Image (cartoon, rainbow, N blue to C red):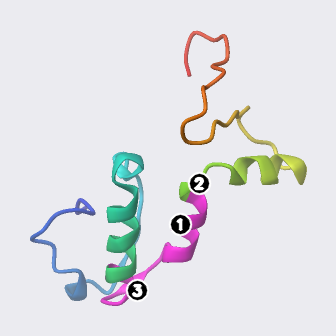
């Protein structure tokens, strides 16, 4: 396993790479997507940059729900918009 942002990682040295759980990407969104594009040019990136970009915007969950796919209940707020947090013990 290698952290996506490890500056010593030689991505060209891998036959393929798979993104698993980059928990810090929301705060570093542009940097993460730039990394994905760079790595995809060096090795086979199983998670295509277009898919990573699509899934980084969680509004895709609403599209899945509208299509009848079971999803975790999800609410959205646009940048700068006040969030109407659900009343729950955990969010």
**Element class at badge 1:** helix
- Residue 47, position as x, y percentages in the image: 49, 72
First to last magenta residue range? 39-55
- SS for dot 2: loop
| Residue drawn 30% across the image and 89% down it | 42
Residue under label 1: 53
Mark 3: secondary structure: strand
Residue indicated by mark 3: 44
Q: Which of these two is toward me, 24 or 27?
A: 27
Task: Estimate the spatial distance between the alpha carbons at disc 3 and disc 2, rounded to whole Å.
Answer: 23 Å
- Report the quarter where the C terminus lies: top right
In the picture of the structure, the residue carrying the numbered disc 2 is 57
Q: Judge whether 89 appears above or below 48 on screen.
A: above
Residue 36's image quarter?
bottom left
**Residue 80, quarter of picture:** top right
Residue at screen point 47% across, 77% down: 46
Q: Quadrant of the N terminus?
A: bottom left
- CB-based contact (under 8 Å), mark 3 and mark 2: no
* Contact flag, marks 1 and 2 (Cβ < 8 Å): yes
Q: Is residue 78 left or right of residue 33?
A: right
């Amino acid at each position: 396993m290698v952290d996506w942002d490890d500056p010593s990682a030689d991505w060209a040295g891998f036959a393929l790479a798979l993104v698993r759980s980059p928990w810090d990407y929301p705060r570093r969104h542009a940097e993460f997507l730039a990394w994905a594009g760079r790595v995809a040019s060096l090795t086979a990136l199983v998670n295509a940059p277009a898919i990573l970009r699509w899934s980084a915007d969680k509004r895709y969950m609403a599209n899945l729900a509208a299509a009848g796919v079971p999803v975790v209940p999800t609410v959205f707020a646009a940048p700068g918009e006040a969030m109407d947090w659900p009343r729950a013990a955990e969010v």
